[in-house]
Image: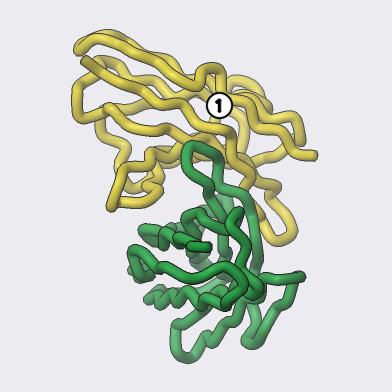
Amino acid sequence: DVKVTQSSRYLVKRTGEKVFLECVQDMDHENMFWYRQDPGLGLRLIYFSYDVKMKEKGDIPEGYSVSREKKERFSLILESASTNQTSMYLCASSPREGRGIQYFGAGTRLSVL
Amino acid sequence: GQNIDQPTEMTATEGAIVQINCTYQTSGFNGLFWYQQHAGEAPTFLSYNVLDGLEEKGRFSSFLSRSKGYSYLLLKELQMKDSASYLCAVRDTKAAGNKLTFGGGTRVLVKP
């Protein structure tokens, strides 16, 4: 079974803090993704990566950055957390070939106070 | 860009059938996915359509019409555990890295 692991289920941070969200997948997938999910807005893509050290902006990259130093690990960074970044963050991975099904982690619910 | 529409919420009775519609507009279609997401959990893959027609997998079926920009997910013999959100997602031919665009999701409530 594909396993996508996010480092924390719940996080509480203060405005202005630097926040790291970590994601690890064990299926040697080339592609990895970070989404945020908010009521009424669905899943929105923040950043994705299709190879080590490669990154592409998604639909809402402002206020975020990412790092992909190793194939299995994709980190989302909030340089200076703000209250409007309170959300559920979901990581996903997919193989480059085939149907390209994305497999999701359990999510991190981040609250910025 | 892409635009994906699906109803916000549907209610159905245990044992019945529910059909969740999804319409999309895309510059270049390369596959449509359905995911199930229970409250507080990760989305899990249900089905994939890239050609027109019906794909059946047990109690769940998914249909696609590319010319109409339309898909539906059919849930038969509803069970209480089917209460969840169902997400429609489309992949564009120009999308690098298997990037998907998701609709807002349809919350299905199954009542006894």
Quadrant of residue B106 in the image? bottom left
Viewer can see residue B1: no
Quarter of the image for the N terminus of chain A: give it. top right
Residue B58 in the image: x percent, y percent?
76, 70
x 57%, y 54%: residue: B98
Residue B71 in the image: x percent, y percent?
51, 79
Quadrant of residue B27 in the image? bottom left
x 65%, y 67%: residue: B48
Q: Residue furthest right?
A: A1
Q: Which residue is mark 1?
A: A74
Amino acid at dot 1: Phe
Quadrant of residue A57 in the image? top left
Residue A16 in the image: x percent, y percent?
21, 11
Give the letter of the yellow chain. A
x 50%, y 31%: residue: A107
Q: Chain of mark 1?
A: A
How many marks on residues? 1
Badge 1 marks a residue whose secondary structure is strand
Give the letter of the green chain. B
Residue B4 in the image: x percent, y percent?
37, 68
